[in-house]
Image (tube, rainbow, N blue to C red):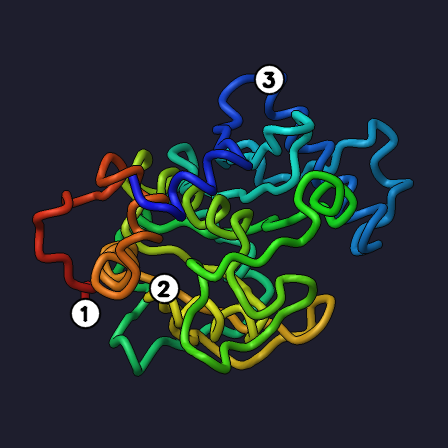
């Protein structure tokens, strides 16, 4: 086991929200971050203190738990294609002006809807992470010099971000997802690229609690990039290949259209 892998699992646990109790914890963490800490949503709209929307009926969640306190510090949601409504639009398709990625040659119309998902509700509780985490930086996670900072993430990729990436990859593999849409902060996109995690622009910037960039990624390309550039990050994300869609020994390539 590499040092980064051991350090991560000493601090955090990746928890799939696969039962009603864990889903309730996920919704409550969303309420904490989106309504109380960042005021992105009106808390009065959620008297149950659980932030829930229409996309949760066809979504998967992964929680990141602080082992020391038992509290949940982070969350990522993957909105999956609705088998009952295969033509249902993802939020990014409804609210963003999507074009295509000339860089990667990706066109939404060429990707089977059953293989497409959207990453959303990516959140970290500043309150919980300060208590269990104290904003540590790990030299073993640092990327190239001059990597951009973003919010309280600092210049290195914290363990908790690795956990969220792991949750995204694992949920995608488990649900046979090959491509994912997202709306991300430009600085975060640049930061992740230092670790072989590449997203491609799918339209102009949008204003959503600050400037956000609509993007798309190919899961196989992300796995390839991590494996080739940061094997230690790949080992955490895939649990040494357990959640690699094509396996450690496969030659993974991005799908081009």
Q: Give the mark, 3 or 2, whose residue is nearer the N terminus.
A: 3
Callout 3 environment at 10 Å: few (<14), some (14 to 19), or many (20+)? few
* Picture residue at 26% right of the left edge, 55% below the top: 231
Check disc 1: other Cα within 10 Å, few if <14, some if 14-19, many if 20+.
few
- The quarter of the picture where residue 44 lies is top right
Quick one: SS at disc 2?
Answer: loop
User: x and y percent of residue 149 in the render?
Assistant: 60, 73
Please provide percent x and percent y for residue 42.
86, 48
3D distance between C-alphas at marks 3 and 2: 32 Å
Q: Nearer the viewer, residue 139 or 94?
A: 139
The residue that mark 2 highlights is: 197
Quadrant (top left/top right/bottom left/bottom right) for the C terminus: bottom left
In the rendered image, which quarter is residue 72 located in?
Answer: top right
Figure quadrant of residue 151: bottom right
In this rendering, position of residue 213 left or right of residue 211? left
Mark 2 neighbour class, 10 Å CA radius: few under 14, some 14 to 19, many 20 or more = many
> Which mark, residue 147?
none
Q: CA distance from mark 1 to mark 3?
A: 38 Å
Which residue in the structure is indicated by mark 3?
Answer: 20
* Residue at image location 71% in from the left, 72% down from the top: 210
């Amino acid at each position: 086991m590499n040092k980064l892998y051991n350090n991560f699992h000493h601090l955090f646990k990746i928890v799939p929200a696969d039962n009603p109790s864990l889903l309730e914890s996920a919704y409550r963490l969303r309420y904490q971050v989106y309504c109380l800490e960042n005021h992105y949503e009106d808390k009065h709209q959620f008297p149950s203190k659980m932030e829930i929307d229409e996309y949760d009926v066809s979504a998967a969640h992964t929680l990141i738990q602080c082992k020391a306190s038992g509290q949940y510090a982070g969350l990522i949601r993957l909105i999956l294609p609705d088998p009952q409504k295969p033509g249902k639009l993802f939020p990014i398709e409804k609210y963003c002006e999507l074009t295509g990625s000339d860089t990667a040659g990706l066109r939404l119309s060429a990707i089977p809807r059953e293989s497409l998902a959207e990453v959303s509700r990516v959140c970290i509780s500043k309150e919980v992470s300060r208590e269990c985490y104290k904003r540590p930086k790990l030299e073993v996670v640092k990327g190239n010099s001059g990597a951009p900072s973003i919010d309280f993430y600092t210049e290195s990729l914290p363990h908790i971000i690795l956990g969220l990436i792991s949750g995204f990859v694992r949920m995608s593999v488990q649900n046979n997802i090959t491509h994912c849409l997202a709306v991300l902060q430009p600085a975060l996109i640049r930061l992740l690229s230092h670790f072989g995690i590449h997203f491609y622009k799918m339209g102009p910037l949008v204003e959503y609690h600050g400037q956000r960039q609509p993007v798309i990624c190919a899961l196989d390309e992300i796995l390839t990039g991590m494996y080739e550039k940061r094997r230690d990050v790949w080992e955490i994300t895939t649990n040494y290949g357990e959640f690699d869609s094509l396996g450690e020994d496969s030659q993974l390539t991005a799908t081009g259209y």
